[in-house]
Image (cartoon, coloured by chain):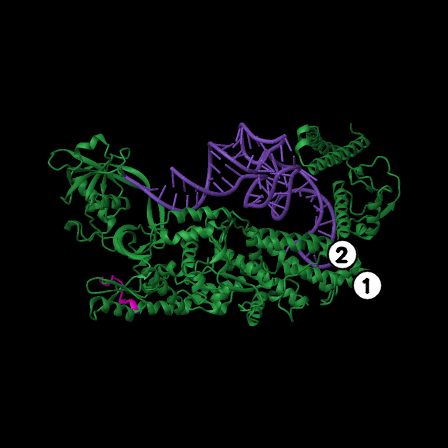
Chain colours: A green, B purple
Amino acid sequence: MLDKTYRPQEVEDRQYARWEEAKAFAAQFDETKKPFTIMIPPPNVTGSLHIGHALNNTIQDILVRYQRMQGRDVLWQPGTDHAGIATQMVVERQLGAKGIELDRGMPLAPGNSQQIGREEFIKRVWEWREESGGIILKQLRRLGASCDWSRERFTMDEGLSEAVLKVFVTLYRKKLIYRDKRLVNWDPRFHTAISDLEVEQKEINGHLWHFKYPIEGEEGRFITVATTRPETMLGDTAVAVHPEDERYRDLVGKHAILPLVGRRIVIVADDYADPEQGSGAVKITPAHDFNDFEVGKRHGLEMINVFDRDAHLSDSVPEAYRGLERFEARRRIVADMEAEGLLEKIDDHRHTVPHGDRSGVPIEPYLTDQWYVDAATLAKPAIEAVESGRTVFVPKQWERTYYEWMRNIQPWCISRQLWWGHQIPAWYGPDGEVFVAHDEGEAAKAAEAHYGKPVDLTRDTDVLDTWFSSALWPFSTLGWPENTKALKRYYPGDVLVTSFDIIFFWVARMMMSGLEFMDGEVPFHTVYIHALVRDEKGQKMSKSKGNVVDPLELIDKFGADAVRFTLTALAAQGRDIKLAESRIEGYRNFCTKIWNAARFCEMNDCAYGADFDPADNRQRVNRWIVSQAAQVEPKVRQAIESYRFNEAAQAIYQFVWHTYCDWYLEFAKPLFQGDDEAAKAETRATALWVLHKALFLAHPIMPFLTEELWLQTGNGEKELMTTAAWPGFPEALVDAEADAALNWVVRMIGQIRAVRSEMNVPPGARIALIVNEASDISKARVGDHQALIQTLARVETIAFDQPVPDGSVQDVLEEATLVLPLADVIDIGQEQARLKKEMDKLKGEIGKLDKKLSNDQFLAKAPAEVVAEQRERLADSQQTMDKLQTALERLGGV
RNA sequence: GGGCGUAUAGCUCAGCGGGAGAGCGCCUCGUUGACAUCGAGGAGGUCCCUGGUUCAAUCCCAGGUACGCCCACCA
């Protein structure tokens, strides 16, 4: 017996356990089936499930569950990412709470009691990961994700690390990885370089300081420069002016004296200086600004690094400023310049400042040695693969974004000065010679060959950008570089499901590495880009705004299926999702509705029978509902296959609630209560059969509820729905005659109800329905379904072949139908107004059609069927108009 | 500065070269023997503006306005 209400939580736990027990999600390596592969975007090992994950994984789960039911050999590969900076940050913070800090060669900070080295730190991170890492994968189970958990991978696993080594060494030997000294985005909080993508621009209200630099040898003459960052002036090595700027032409080649420092700096002519901006002269700090760096290279300027790793002033500045924190230095320098009378003015200035996306502190352009990937070279085949359609984006417009970025791609800085991550396999000889090798032994051999004798090597201390290993995910998880069975069977992937914000971080880089290392084979054929989930007001969810919706709380409150269904129903292509709780509530109600439909079947003794064949049905209502179901199936199938998940959800919702529950079950009631045992048996079987088919169609979206009902009312004991076959509906089950007849009845009952409602017919009133003798079809249909109509429309009697009584307003109803309220309750005035309004509307319509149909060009150029259709519509409208006119006259109107 | 997207009912959003749609909310009526987490019906719209293409534009094109996002730059 089904419980009185659906209790999601208990059902979800039980059903998930059954699936796991049956190993229902395991990749099968079944050669008789076609493989279907999806690689999960590995969540950060530190992460917990947010609503974006919920959407992302719901969509993936729908795809894999659907394909599994289609008989594909599905691999949904799960795992987590070691998330270099994010994880190091989390663990550092936890250690910090215990007074432990990392030994960075600095004195122990006040309040802390212990410093630990690299090895110890990494040990602690692993310990942390054992304890609390990967919570998110457990949370994915609550959502219902059907990953092959036996194949779970972690980017720091041995195998995946082996892949990283192999890729690094190979790319290095191909000169696609190299070491270079250039400006990088330096995060002073984490003491590491970060890539361009990890920089976030924030608008702030700042100032523009105008400084006067004295000209050497010309007493009293100054050149004014403006800056948003006064502290960098200590590293100035030039002032640039535009070559055609008349104001400064005579100064080019001369020198200015850098205040506070006393250094002679040259005045150069360079197009970079914009005469329109500020004073037209710009200070050049090659070691701390990306543009200035380029200018410096062009003019062979000295590059003076004024900061240390913490962005404190270094020993390269005058003693008074050494060791100052950068913002303190700014205040001091402005004050000193003012004291010297060299501060011309301060303007307010709104500008953007780059911040580290993890640390949140302003980043410093900083001159260091780093490792780079020659992304431009790797991008070429990755661009070609999309151009040629070997990988397609859905929706297609994202291809533009992809091209845009790929065609302007910059060298990818992959080294990070962190401890947590894949350490770079590079060793340095005594003179700094680099040896990149798989391991230390190999490096030593190479070094010995180079120097002619064994030497001591020191290993590069940097680790790789976390995305370096993520980029290999589509094949490293399958065992590459070993040539495994899994690799052969499940590469390339079919679909990658992700949101647009990691197209650059991840998708682009997987494309590059996949093509490079898998013999030019793309890592996936389709990239499905889904929406971003925003809050009710359309704002991005963020912890600081406090508008974060926790999917686990929603699951607790409404059930996983309701949450999944909501996300699916809202996941239209090309638009962000605004998530309102009222929406989830609505779909929770849908879950309840399904549950109650099953209860209704159960109460009417419907029983599952494996050999039931609806093709043998005799009752028209039963043939009708089967036909309706058969027409829903292709809608759902096509919607899922074309990634229009919201349409699939809508089709299911509409069918189950409004067709099956609202109409069919009502139709079935008299049959259940009647004396015709054959009809009763047929209806029992059909009601349940159709319900089960609908459950199958809904299963990819709402797996828990459907599996539970299949277990309790179907064949779930013997066959899990999740591994069963997608329901087929033979063409023959579509019954046009039954469709036409019952759809007519549905419409008519609706109309009768409308009239009752509109005319305020009191509940007890007697109503007679008189069918015009002229309409054979209507007669037949009413005759066949007399009982249904009488019950559902609460019609007292139905009579045939009666003359149309004069004075009735109900001519407005469909051709052959009349509803006659025996109690005289019509509000004449109200009815007249309604009719007039309706006629006005029709008049406009008729006018439009009339004009169109008398337009020669329309008649000549429009397709014949369109013309015919319009004619028909005009005729219909005119006929209705006549009826309305008659009705109005009878009511005494004009 | 470059690119992308969006604009349709009170709200959230589908849709479409030929009759303007759904859910929620609102109003009316009904139903308490599957389900009040229910059913039937209704009101409500200049499909952002201007121009163009077309026999026909809410839809296609161009321009504009507003909002959102991405990239780059910012002395």
Real-space Cα distance between discs 1 and 2?
A: 15 Å
* Label 2: element kind: helix
* Circle 1: residue type: Ala
Residue A454 lies in quadrant:
bottom left
Q: Does the magenta stretch mainly form a helix, a strand or a loop?
A: loop
Kindly identify the amino acid type of the residue bearing the numbered disc 2.
Arg
Q: Residue at x 89, y 42 (%)?
A: A802
Q: Is residue A535 visible?
A: yes
The answer to whether residue A412 is above or below residue A760 is: below
Q: Which one is nearer the viewer's eye here, A154 or A343?
A: A154
Disc 1 crowd rating (10 Å Cα; few below 14, some 14-19, many 20+) is: few
**Residue mark closest to the camera, 1 vs 2:** 2
Q: Looking at the rendering, which quadrant does residue A612 occupy?
A: bottom right
Q: Is residue A661 visible?
A: no
Identify the disc placed on residue A623.
Answer: 2
Tell me residue A767's x, y (percent).
Answer: 83, 45
Q: Nearer the viewer, residue A525 or A805?
A: A525
The relative height of residue A773 versus residue A560 in the rendered view (above or below) is above
Q: Is residue A441 left or right of residue A431?
A: right
> Does A893 lie within the magenta span?
no
Q: Residue at x 29, y 61 (%)?
A: A462
Q: Mark 1 highlights which residue? A: A678
Tell me which segment is drawn in magenta. Answer: A106-119
Work out which quarter of the rendered image holds the N terminus of chain A and state it.
bottom right
In the structure shown, which secondary structural element does the residue marked by tag 1 occupy? helix
Residue A502: percent from the left, percent from the top? Answer: 43, 53
How far across and how far down the image is residue A768, in percent? 84, 45
For mark 1, name the chain. A
Category of crowding for the residue at label 2, using alpha-carbon neighbours closer than 10 angstroms: few (below 14), some (14–19), many (at least 20): many
